[in-house]
Amino acid sequence: MGSLMGSAAIINQISIESLLFYIGCVFWTLSYDTIYAHQDKKDDEKLGMKSTALYFGDTTKSWLKRFYLISLMTWLYAGILSSLNNIFYIALLAVGFIFHRQYKSFNPDDPSQCMSIFKNNSYVGLLLFFGILLDRIVNSMYPFSGAAENA
């Protein structure tokens, strides 16, 4: 929601870039919240509560793969439209590596491992934040002057 509010406050409209970034964050949140929900799915089932862990059930892992890919693709496209440079893409590559590790190691029946993966997502947020911040700082200090501009 912050990217949408920031866009509206600064340019008086919601930019496509901020909307794409927001959509990526929604799918990322859906991923880590579903992983978190697997910790207490037995209790949820007993109490008759609804959760994404119960809804996706045995297909959770394939849904996580989709959600991770949607997040990465929307963030990539937002980065391209925002004219972000290498620092952001290196950070996004690291996020992709984290997502891959989480996907490979995810065991929906191991609550402590689900908590570990859930907590690991704080690094995703930090990488995205600092990837964008450092990219913008470096780009403002050393603007790119490519051959296309000189042609």
Image: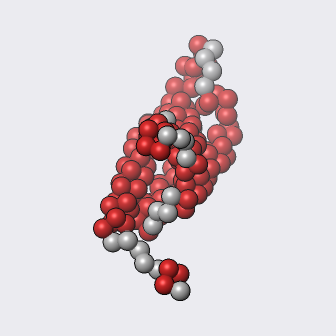
Residue depicted at x 38% and y 71%? 143
* Residue positioned most to the top: 47
Coordinates of residue 76 in the picture (x, y in percent): 55, 58
Coordinates of residue 78 in the picture (x, y in percent): 55, 55
* Residue positioned most to the bottom: 151
Coordinates of residue 83 in the picture (x, y in percent): 49, 63
**Residue 134 appears anywhere in the view:** yes
**Left or right for 73, reference 140:** right
* Residue positioned most to the left: 141
**Left or right for 95, reference 71:** left
Residue depicted at x 53% and y 86%? 151
**Residue 116 appears anywhere in the view:** no
Residue depicted at x 55% and y 59%? 81
The image's colouring method is secondary structure
**Left or right for 54, reference 17:** right
Query: In the image, is residue 34 above or below residue 24?
Result: above
Coordinates of residue 97 in the picture (x, y in percent): 49, 59
Q: How many marks?
A: 0
Query: In the image, is residue 98 above or below residue 64?
Result: below
Residue depicted at x 62% and y 30%? 52
Residue sitting nearer the eye, 53 or 29: 29
Query: In the image, is residue 140 above or below residue 123?
Result: below
